[in-house]
Amino acid sequence: MTNPTRNSLFIFILILSISLTLCSTQKNQIEKINGVNFVSTPYPVDESNFQPIVDINANFVAAIPYSFTRGRTPNVSFNTPSQWYGETVAGTINIIEEAKKKGLKTMIKPHIWVMGDGWAGEFELTNEKDWKKWEAGFDDYILTYAKLADSLDVDVFCMATEFRKVVEKRPQYWDQLILKIRKVYNGKLTYAANWDNYDKVQFWDQLDYIGIDAYFPLKHIATPTVNELVYAWSPVKKLLKDLSDKHKKPLLFTEYGYQSVDFGAGRHWDIDVRNLEPNEITQKNAYEAMYQVFWDEDWVAGGFLWKWFPEHQESGGKQNKRFTPQNKEAQKIISKYYLKHKKN
């Protein structure tokens, strides 16, 4: 004879087990911004250029319209005939519209190139007159693309990228710029701080996401393991969680990525890739560790990998030492985690 009490207990345990499994699955399936930073081209793109992005289970694309300034001078130049098409207003419209045709969400992320220096982080001026002129030109640049972002229903606008010195020396300027952007753009707003000075940004409370370009040096050996990299992330993760808690804002990795070369998970700016061997495993392990550490955390909104070229079949590959994960082992890792954290 069947024991009713035993059957009831079995059914209770079964239901409890299923419930716990579903809760665990739901936690691990938090939808993220699974994005790519899209490399501009000198010619128009079409929706076929975005199919490989869909194939890796990404759901966001960042368009990057460039402007130019010259070191120690106050002029800002953008949307000029000398620029590549994809870096201009027309090219940005083209990228956004074609990405949307494939069901992808979008971000516009302006970058400024400092001619003679390259990186915007060290840009500064020496007198108030020049600062005011530069700020007026930068306003024109950013507000042009903020208005464009609003007209195209762009989901996120990143108002600037990696201005280490300008952010520290001109804090009132950024307060004013944010107010101006909010008047013309109704989507989510962020700023891309470099990994080594995000703590100097004073305006996180005014934005929707804390944006960080996450090139933290983790382990400066040729081929670190996933476990070594996860361990290296531990103190950084605590700092980032504290930052998110302090400002009550989610973290967004506006850029993250690794070169597929020996020492690619360390201080990449200190290595000369020409003298090093290609190393897909270092890049793959670094991506795996990144996702293990952050992608299940509800205080992390997600991020945009650096970087993705429009001509997928001709990009990356085993002998390519650069940041793109295309046609490398890392692409499989990205696809796996992006699928796990993708809305069905």
Image (cartoon, rainbow, N blue to C red):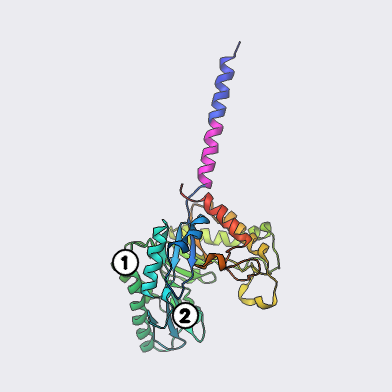
User: In the image, is residue 212 above or below residue 134?
Assistant: above
What's drawn in magenta, residue-wise?
A: 16-28
Q: Residues within 10 Å of mark 2 (few under 14, many from 20)?
A: some
Q: Which residue is mark 2?
A: 113
Q: Position of residue 310 (x, y in %)?
A: 49, 67
Q: Looking at this view, is 38 or 114 the one in front?
A: 38
User: Can you say whether 42 is above or below 58 in the image?
Assistant: below
Q: Mark 1 falls on what kind of element? A: helix
**Residue at 33% across, 78% down:** 140
Q: Say what amino acid the circle numbered 2 marks.
A: Trp
**How far is the residue under mark 2 from the one under mark 1?**
25 Å
**Quadrant occupied by the N terminus:** top right
Say which of marks 2 and 1 sits in front: 2
Residue bearing mark 1: 182
Task: Report the amino acid beneath label 1.
Answer: Arg
Q: Give how far across and how far down residue 71 sits, in percent.
A: 47, 87
Q: In the picture, residue 332 is in which quadrant?
A: bottom right
- Mark 2: secondary structure: strand
Give percent across and percent down for residue 319. 66, 69
**23 or 202: nearer the eye?**
23
- The local crowd at label 1, few if under 14, some if 14 to 19, many if 20 or more residues have their Cα within 10 Å, is some
Specify whether 88 is left or right of 268. Answer: left
Q: Main secondary structure of the magenta part?
A: helix
Q: Residue at 56% across / 28% down in the picture?
A: 14
